[in-house]
Image (cartoon, helix red, strand yellow):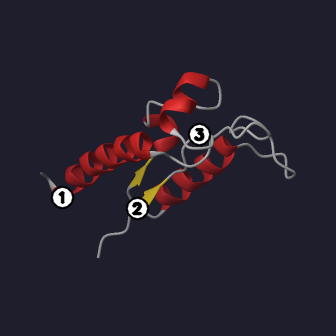
């Protein structure tokens, strides 16, 4: 079986946004970088939704309203966008 990883998308629920640090002093980008680094180390395909979703809810209120239910969880439009991106990524892995 083939294993793939997908990074989290950017978020902003009003009190915490992807570009803010947590109690460990880390941002979401720090975690995304760690995921990609480990995937690269083990040759595991990784789709970077954080950078490639085309959505920046951390700094864009219109995209936040259009793509998420609450600034964190995708709504129907957000799920559709993620589905299309992941489908293309998976097809590229199997040569379709």
Of the two numbered discs 3 and 1 in the rendering, the one whose residue sits closer to the viewer: 3
What residue is at 67 percent from the left and 44 percent from the top?
A: 28
Where residue 73 sits in the image (x, y, percent)?
Answer: 56, 49
- Image coords of residue 86 (percent x, y): 33, 50
**Residue situated in front as seen by the camera: 49 or 4:** 49
Residue 29 on image: x %, y %: 64, 41
Whether residue 15 is visible here, answered yes or no, is yes
Residue that label 1 marks: 94
Residue 37 vs residue 73, the one in the foreground: 73
Q: Residue at x 75, y 36 (%)?
A: 14
Q: Position of residue 2 (x, y in %)?
A: 31, 70
Residue 29 shows which numbered tag?
A: none
For mark 1, give the secondary structure: helix
Side of 14 relative to 42 (left or right): right
Asked if residue 90 lies left or right of residue 47, the reply is left
Check disc 3 and report the residue beneath it: 10
What residue sits 77% from the left and 41% below the top? Answer: 16
The Cα atoms of the two marked residues, 2 and 3, are separated by: 22 Å
* Tag nearer the camera, 2 or 1: 1
Residue density around tag 1, few if under 14, some if 14–19, many if 20 or more, within 10 Å: few
């Amino acid at each position: 079986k083939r294993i793939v990883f997908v990074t989290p998308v950017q978020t902003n629920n009003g009190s915490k946004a992807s570009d803010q640090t947590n109690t460990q002093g880390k941002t979401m980008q720090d975690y995304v970088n760690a995921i990609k680094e480990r995937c690269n180390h083990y040759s595991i395909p990784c789709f970077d939704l954080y950078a490639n979703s085309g959505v920046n809810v951390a700094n864009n209120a219109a995209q936040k309203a259009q793509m998420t239910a609450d600034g964190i969880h995708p709504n129907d439009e957000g799920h559709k966008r993620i589905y299309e991106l992941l489908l293309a990524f998976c097809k590229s892995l199997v040569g379709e």
